[in-house]
Amino acid sequence: MAFTKWMRSPIGVGVAACCLVGALASFYFTSSGSAFPAYSNPQWYYDLNNGEVFVSSDVCPPIPTKSGPHDGAPAGVHAVLFSCTDCSDEKARFVGYIETVDAEFRASIPPGQLNGWYNPLAGGSDSILAATRIRRPDAGDWVAADSEEAAALTESINQKCTGDQTLIRCPAPAPGVVH
């Protein structure tokens, strides 16, 4: 009897309401239908047609660009930028490698879930990592991101810095910010 009296009190109602909101929030975030962690942070992208680097919070690469398609597919691929001195200095930044997701894997993702793509080399789903292809921006074949060739490619980026310089991975600014 004391429990039902407590539940009818303002404190009991407040506790019950908080529990209900927590349960609903938990249900919403765990059953949103996305197979991948949400990823809406801006990222660097590279246009395969003209080498332009731009920022987008867009979907799983490749993404459409103003320059049009490249070899029958969208030309925008994820770019990973580095600097040996200062990421805020545009002239000091360079594209270490570019990455995309193979067409078969991308086609298997329901359209509403494409915004869930994120940088697979930073950790996450093994299936995304296995489907990711990387290469140098200027040449070379696409290689699996989880291959020895990819490891050698990413390791070679360290060679760009000399002396006491340290390789810095450059985050993308928010879209619309001058970079």
Image (cartoon, helix red, strand yellow):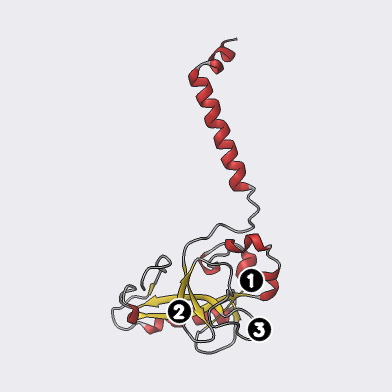
Q: Amino acid at mark 3?
A: Gly
**Residue 107, x across and y down, in percent:** 70, 70
Q: Residue furthest front?
A: 66
Say if 26 sits above or below 96 in the image: above
- Name the mark nearer the viewer: 1 or 2: 2
Amino acid type indicated by mark 2: Val
- Alpha carbons under labels 3 and 2: distance apart: 20 Å
Please identify the quadrant where the C terminus is shown. bottom left
Q: CA distance from mark 1 to mark 2?
A: 25 Å
Q: Nearer the observer, disc 1 or disc 3?
A: 3
Q: Residue furthest bottom?
A: 139
Lower sequence index among marks 1 and 2: 2
Q: Residue furthest top?
A: 1
Residue lying at 58% horizontally and 61% vertically, measured from the top left: 116
Label 3, on which residue?
72
- Give residue 117's position: percent from left, percent from top: 58, 64
Quadrant in the picture for residue 156: bottom left
Q: Secondary structure at mark 1?
A: helix
Rendered image: mark on residue 53: 2
Q: Where does label 1 land, which residue?
A: 130
Residue contact between numbered discs 3 and 2, judged by CB atoms under 8 Å: no
